[in-house]
Image: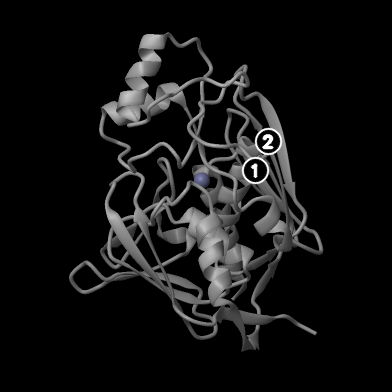
Amino acid sequence: MAEKQRTVAEVVTLSGKGLHSGKQVNLVIKPAGENYGYRFQRVDLEGQPVIRALAENVVSTARGTTLQENGGQVMTIEHLCAALQGVGVDNTHIEIDGPEVPIMDGSSKYFIQGLKAAGTVEQLEDRNYFSVTEKVVYREDNGVEVSIEPADSYSIDVHIDFNSKVLGKQQARLGSLSDFETEISSCKTFVFLHELEFLAQNNLIKGGDVDNALIIVDRPMSQEQLDRLSQLFHKPKIEVLPEGYLNNTERTFENEPARHKLLDIVGDLALAGVHLKGKVVANKPGHHANTELAKKIRQLITNHK
Ligand SMILES: [Zn+2]
């Protein structure tokens, strides 16, 4: 029997700070009817524009995926969209009173918690699927390649290589969305320390504390530099662990960075707007490559209609 579409059983409310803006934002995740998909509504803007979570609405992929439609934008949608996929929600209307989905702890954990507490309900219509019949590939010259090929079910394989002593080659795999919660959802985003210092100094990162990312230190640090970081991050004692990560937050999995890249893929490919049947293979993925693949899939879906 075909699977049915699902929506949230009751309203879910969440709040937190945006990573880029540092602004406190409230999310209200509401039930929606069949074939609605995921839509955001900027209730803080005049006219309260609605922005559909579809690949053709992606306008930026710099440090997160940004959507724009009807004169409204919403940033950093990927960890929330991944959580919606993970709990099997097809349709929801999300009110947001700021420009950016809150970063929470840098993973999908708190979105999953909220969604699971509310639960989901089955709807009348069958779930919409796109079954891949021919391999679809997005490729760049620098070794970046994200593809989806025919398979009976949805799976994702990720390979990363940052060519760094601390973060070299890693891989992660998700065999089924039903494993998303336990295997992937709590994996935090990561950043190299030199990037973070730059972002902080240029006011590009204001989420506040440093609990929402794994921080990778791939060069020697003097005590003076560490003390400066302690100040910058408002943390009493910052040190580098032997594995090369800062002691700001805990790492659950040895290959957590690769798992987080997989989390991002789940969220970005949700912008295809339907469930996918196919095997995704990603080498050195990022939001740009992920959403370019989602755009190609969207074109195939639209042409089929
Ligand atoms: Zn991410």
Image coords of residue 5 (percent x, y)? 62, 81
Q: 186 or 32, which lies in front?
A: 186
Q: Does 92 appear above or below 110?
A: below
In the image, taking residue 88 as reference, residue 291 lies left or right, namely left
Q: Does 32 appear above or below 41?
A: below
Q: 113 or 5, which lies in front?
A: 113
Which residue corresponds to mark 1? 259
Question: Colour scheme in the image?
Answer: one colour
Q: Which residue sits at x=48%, y=46%?
A: 106
Which numbered dot is residue 255?
Answer: 2
User: What's under tag 1, amino acid-wise?
Assistant: Arg
The residue positioned farthest toward the left in the image shown: 46
In the image, taking residue 24 as reference, residue 11 lies left or right, namely right
In what element is the residue under mark 2? loop
In the image, taking residue 135 as reference, residue 9 lies left or right, namely left
Circles 1 and 2, Cβ within 8 Å, touching? The answer is yes
The residue positioned farthest toward the front in the image shown: 236
Give the quarter of the figure containing the N terminus: bottom right
Q: Which residue sits at x=55%, y=25%?
A: 245
